[in-house]
Image: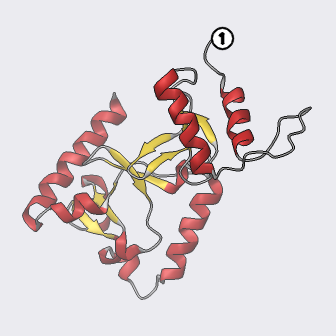
Amino acid sequence: MGELTIEQTEELYKFLQGEAPDGYNIENPVKLTSEQAFGVIWFLQERYRIIPDRYEQCNKCKEIFDSYSEGIYAKDGSACECCRSEYNYCPLCDEYFKKSETPETTYFVLSLDDAKDQDMQPGLYKAKNFPIYSSNMISQWIYKDAVEVEKETNEYEETGFICQECFNKLTEDDRTSCAREAVSKQHTTAQG
């Protein structure tokens, strides 16, 4: 017997949570949590190599997905393609991180082009310090609506935003030079 397919792995995952496959009637089914069921899948991946190591559990919806064809690895786990819009990409640490729900904990790189448009210096900013969020004309609920619209349309911005850990590690003097480096990295990635 070769490795299990994604469909077979999903069937096993559901079976471990108490859902019997069509045509089977199990009297006392096993009822593991999604985390426990994936723990069994992981063990079969690592120890016996009968399930490909590329099958992951989405941290948000708990579905199994093939990481070679969809999804991302993030700081707090993996995300399938449907849940990917919940994450931003940090160009400083080169990792995905969960999007923040509030401008007080959202950080981003203001690129050279964007800085010219905003008449500001390029650098790293907290969203609450950015003019559109600190303006009396733009309230916090509009920010939340923008986040919701972004989730609904499944459009997400993977560049510009940075994780809180990277922001906290930088001194004021480092922020502009790191922003320029990140912006340069963005342009190089976009061109390549």
Query: Is the C terminus in the top left, top right, bottom left or bottom right quadrant?
Result: top left
Q: Which residue is the site of mark 1? A: 1
Q: Which residue occupies the foreground of this view, 53 or 44?
A: 44
The spot of residue 39 in percent (x, y) is 54, 42
Let me know if residue 29 appears in the view.
yes
Specify the quadrant of the image occupied by residue 123.
bottom left
**Vertical relation: 88 (above or below) 6:** below
Furthest residue toward bottom: 136
Q: Secondary structure at mark 1?
A: loop
Q: Is residue 128 above or below residue 88?
A: below
Observer-nearest residue: 131 or 176? Answer: 176
Label 1, residues with CA under 10 Å away: few <14, some 14-19, many ≥20: few
Above or below, 72 against 140 in this view is above
Residue found at x 21% / y 60%: 122
Q: Residue furthest front?
A: 28
10 with respect to 106 (left or right): right
Q: Is residue 15 left or right of residue 85?
A: right
Give the amino acid type for the residue marked by disc 1 in the picture. Met
User: From this viewpoint, is residue 67 visible?
Assistant: no
* Nearest the eye: 10 or 173: 10
Image quarter of the N terminus: top right
Q: Residue at x 22, y 42 (%)?
A: 184
* Residue at image location 51% in from the left, 21% down from the top: 49
Q: Is 163 placed left or right of 138 in the picture?
A: left
Residue 82 spot, x, y in % from top left? 62, 47
Picture quadrant of residue 112: bottom left
Horizontal side, residue 30 vs residue 125: left or right: right
Q: Residue at x 58, y 72 (%)?
A: 145
Q: Position of residue 20 (x, y in %)?
A: 82, 39
Q: Position of residue 141 (x, y in %)?
A: 54, 81
Q: Residue furthest top?
A: 1
